[in-house]
Amino acid sequence: MEVFKEAFKRIRGKDWEKARGTYQFFKKAVIQAVVECGAMSEEDAALWFNDKTPVDYSVGQLVDEIKAYVDSKPKGFRLPFMIDEAGQYIGTNGLCMSWTGMDRSYRSGSTG
């Protein structure tokens, strides 16, 4: 990810963290940065950027990503969560994400 961020900053002149909320306005820069960091070909990057297919995201997938992140940190690392009421609704299938369920999935070592 750092390679992408550096490429994006060199190409666009802005930090990715500041621009990512409006990335749609920087199509050429995003595609070029993805290609430069070796993630995809230019053709694949353009297809990916233009893809409007909704992505369903399950509790298990989120738990797996969080677990991989925490496992990559030193022993004893803690990751605090701050959750508001709107934060419960994740995904396009209308299901309410259960934070209790997420906790249970994490503790059981969910794999999707």
Image: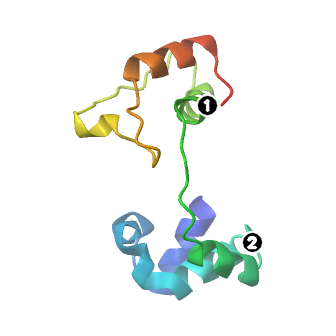
Q: Residue at x 75, y 70 (%)?
A: 38
Q: Which residue is drawn at 58% across and 29% down?
A: 60
Which SS class for mark 2?
A: loop
Q: Residue at x 52, y 31 (%)?
A: 59
Q: Locate residue 17: give its quadrant.
A: bottom left
Q: Locate residue 2: give its quadrant.
A: bottom right
Quick one: label 1 or label 2, which is nearer the N terminus?
2
Q: Estimate the x, y position of residue 94 in percent, counting from the top left.
A: 40, 42
Relative to 54, 88 lies left or right = left
Q: Which residue is drawn at 64% across and 21% down?
A: 110
Whether 22 is drawn above or below 25: the answer is above
Relative to 68, 43 lies left or right = right
Whether 83 is drawn above or below 48: the answer is above
Identify the residue position indicated by label 1 in the image. Answer: 64
* Tally of marks: 2
Can residue 14 be seen in the rendering of this structure? yes
Which one is in front, 72 or 85? 85
Can residue 13 be seen in the rendering of this structure? no
Which one is in front, 79 or 6? 79
Identify the residue position indicated by label 2 in the image. Answer: 40
Three-letter amino acid code at disc 2? Met
Whether 28 is drawn above or below 62: the answer is below
Q: Estimate the x, y position of residue 6 in percent, counting from the top left.
A: 55, 70
